[in-house]
Each structure stands twice: as structure tokens, then as C-alpha cells.
Image: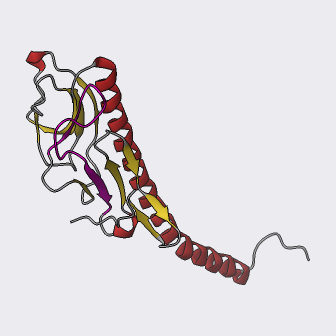
Amino acid sequence: MNSKGFTLIETLVVVALLMTLTAVGIPSLSDFIIKMRVDNEIDRINRLLLVTRNIALNTNQAVTFCPLQSNICVNQWHQELSVFTDANNNKIYEPHLKEQLIQYKDAIVVGDKLQYGNTRKGLTYAPNGYLMGWGQNATFMYCPKGHLAKSRAITVAVSGRAYKSQFNPKKNKEETRSGKKIICK
């Protein structure tokens, strides 16, 4: 007799295999999604730094990158980040002085951390592409909540150049350009 179906045992075996594969695959998928989120945020910040520097060089004026609150740069790096021309280098967006808002980036995922130094409110590029003012060079550190081993960073040098952290296979960890571990406080 020809039968056209599955037996109960065949169905249970397939379901057990699917559940096993799912149990193994879901944690890997979660790790992958977190890694992609962190990589995307680091890439967005890096692009904004490039835009900020290029606008300063091309327009021959100071350009600031910071989180704005009521048009004033604040130390709230997890919020929306903005790039604007800063005619008087005061880290205040003043449209009445014909300062222009060039670009912005949405806030990061709630619970994640983005730090730039401990107290820094923004960074400003001079018309020559260097950072304007003493002590603006530092490292942006992006740390996803509950997954600190997946943290990444961008170091901004006095020259205005930005360097993304890289994975060191010998130490099995992500490091800044100078070989430092990424630690969010």
C-alpha cells in the first residue's frame, strides 16, 4: 500500500531537529545583530566626523560636532548628534549668525552608552582640518548594554583624523589605535 504522508515519529524527529537548530542559532543571531548595531553606529559617527572635517576644510570655517540641547552643545552623547558651522567657536548653534545645521544622527539605542571623554561637550574642526582648541582629541566609545565585549571606539587625533578600533586576534579583543582596551564608565 502506498502512503502519502509522514508518520508521527518522522514528524517528531523533524520538529526536534528544528528546535535544536533554533536553540543553537538564536544566540548566534542575537550576537550578530548586536555586533551589526555597534558597527553601524561606529560607521555613522565616523562618517559624521568626516563630514565635519570636510566642511571645515571646504568652507574655511569652524564646524562643530556635538549633541545639541536648546541649540547648546551638551555632554549627552547618547542623544541626537549634530554637525553645524560655528562662526564664533562657542559650541552654540546660532542661526541668526548664519550658522548652518549641516547634518545630524539619531539617538543611539536606549541603554547603550556613547562616551566622548568624560566632560567633553563637542569637538570643533578648524578651517585647516585640525581640531580647534586644546584637549578636544579623545576617543568615542560605544558600549552596547549587556554586551560590553562587543564595544567599539573611534579615536580622534589632534590632526583631526579619526581612527576606528580594530579587533586584535592575538589578544581576542577590540582595541583602540594605541592598543588600549575599550572601557565604558
Q: Residue at x 24, y 40 (%)?
A: 81
* Rendered location of residue 88, percent (x, y): 11, 25
Q: Is residue 165 above or below residue 7?
A: above
- Tell me which corner region of the image, top left, top right, bottom left or bottom right, holds residue 11: bottom right
Q: Residue at x 40, y 56 (%)?
A: 177
Q: The magenta stretch spans which residues? A: 121-144
Of 118 and 137, the residue lying toward us: 137
Looking at the image, the residue that sits furthest to the right is: 1
Can residue 116 be seen from the camera position used here? yes
| Left or right of 15, for residue 132 | left
Q: Residue at x 52, y 72 (%)?
A: 170
* Rendered location of residue 176, percent (x, y): 38, 59
* Rendered location of residue 131, percent (x, y): 25, 37
Q: How many marks?
A: 0
* Rendered location of residue 125, percent (x, y): 25, 33
As for residue 80 lying within the magenta part, the answer is no
Most frequent secondary structure within the magenta stretch: loop
